[in-house]
Image: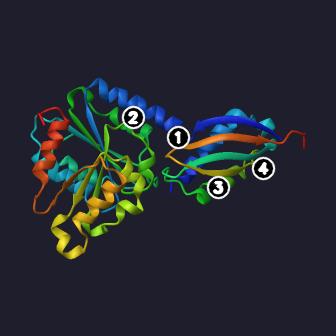
Amino acid sequence: MHELSLANGILDLVQEYVPPDRAWAVRGVRVQVGDWASVLPESLAWCFSAIVSSTPYASASLVIERVPGADLQVADIELEEETP
Amino acid sequence: MSIVTIERRVLEKNDAMAAANRQRFARYGLTVLNLVSSPGAGKTTLLERTLERLPRTVRTAVIEGDVQTDLDAKRVAKFGVPVVQIVTNGSCHLEAHLVEQAIGALDLANLDLLVIENVGNLVCPAAYDLGETMKVVVLSTTEGDDKPLKYPAMFRNAAVLVINKIDLLPFSGASLEAIRKNATGINPDLRIFEVSCVTGEGLDEWCRWLEHCAGYVNA
């Protein structure tokens, strides 16, 4: 049930590293979801796509990796090189 | 394509606020319990029976977290302890910043024990550190003895398990032995209490332990 607020937290981190004028370049946002993190990956991906759709980061989508442990971490962001 | 490395926890803001809360509690030597369970397991009733029994020397305050209403705060306030209600307005768990706001209304220097009753939910509250000393998970026998297996994160993160409604064991078909086995299979270090808030069974032992935690009794 808390995936929406987690998706917002992920977008906050993305915005911190990629300014809005480069937002179009964001592709995959690799997120590591711990097996004990109490997070439903499909729900998190859906929430993320829903919140970015009305922002300049609409091209971003989550690439989710299951990992051991309880952490939920943004690993890295994949950026398109060329101008659109 | 290029890759920007981030490697940061999504909940780092919550965790930083929780760490600040924990430091503040430690400064006042305060024991803080984060009371979690599914809805209806009996958190508030356990709290009521506990407040009846705890000696007044253990200066206690309560933070109540609910999705809606201040019904629980009203129940607890009858016992003459300071109580702050947090209404989450739909959110399914408490977060550290909500607790930080709530403790602004409490005189921490004149408290020994703070009980934070989380929103009834065995999933999301497991992921949010509030700065508590420990999580106490309440499981009622009517929920079935397989709950620890179905919600492992909560039982893994808790230090204490209170098995409530043991008076209903003859009707629920649950087995205390199975609850213990399933819970300790996930977390061997769990301290377990078996109580009934109706008959009072087990409550004295629970309250003695709480007194000890609050620094009043030598174990």
Mark 2 or 1: the one toward you: 1
Task: Determine whether label 3 and label 4 are within 8 Å by CB.
Answer: no
- Which quadrant would residue A20 be assigned to in this image? top right
Mark number, residue B100: 2
| B186 vs B31, nearest the viewer | B186
Asked if the residues shown at circle 1 and circle 4 are in contact, with their CB atoms under 8 angstroms apart, the answer is: no
Q: Secondary structure at mark 2?
A: helix
Q: Secondary structure at mark 1?
A: loop
Q: Please, which chain is the residue tagged with disc 1 on? A: B
Q: Can see residue B58? A: yes
Query: Can you give x and y, in whole percent of width and height, for residue B217 in the image?
Result: 11, 35
Q: Is residue B1 left or right of residue B191?
A: right
Q: Amino acid at mark 2?
A: Glu
Q: Which residue is mark 3?
A: A45
Q: Does B145 sit above or below residue B85?
A: below
Q: Chain of mark 3?
A: A
Q: Which residue is mark 1?
A: B11
Instruction: Please give left or right for residue B200 compared with residue A72 in the image.
Output: left
Of the residues shown, which amino acid type is indicated by label 4?
Ser
Identity of the residue drawn at 39% across and 62% down: B149
Relative to B39, residue B97 above or below:
above
Asked if badge 3 and badge 4 are on a common chain, one would say yes
Are dots 2 and 1 on a single chain? yes
Residue at screen point 14% across, 36% down: B58
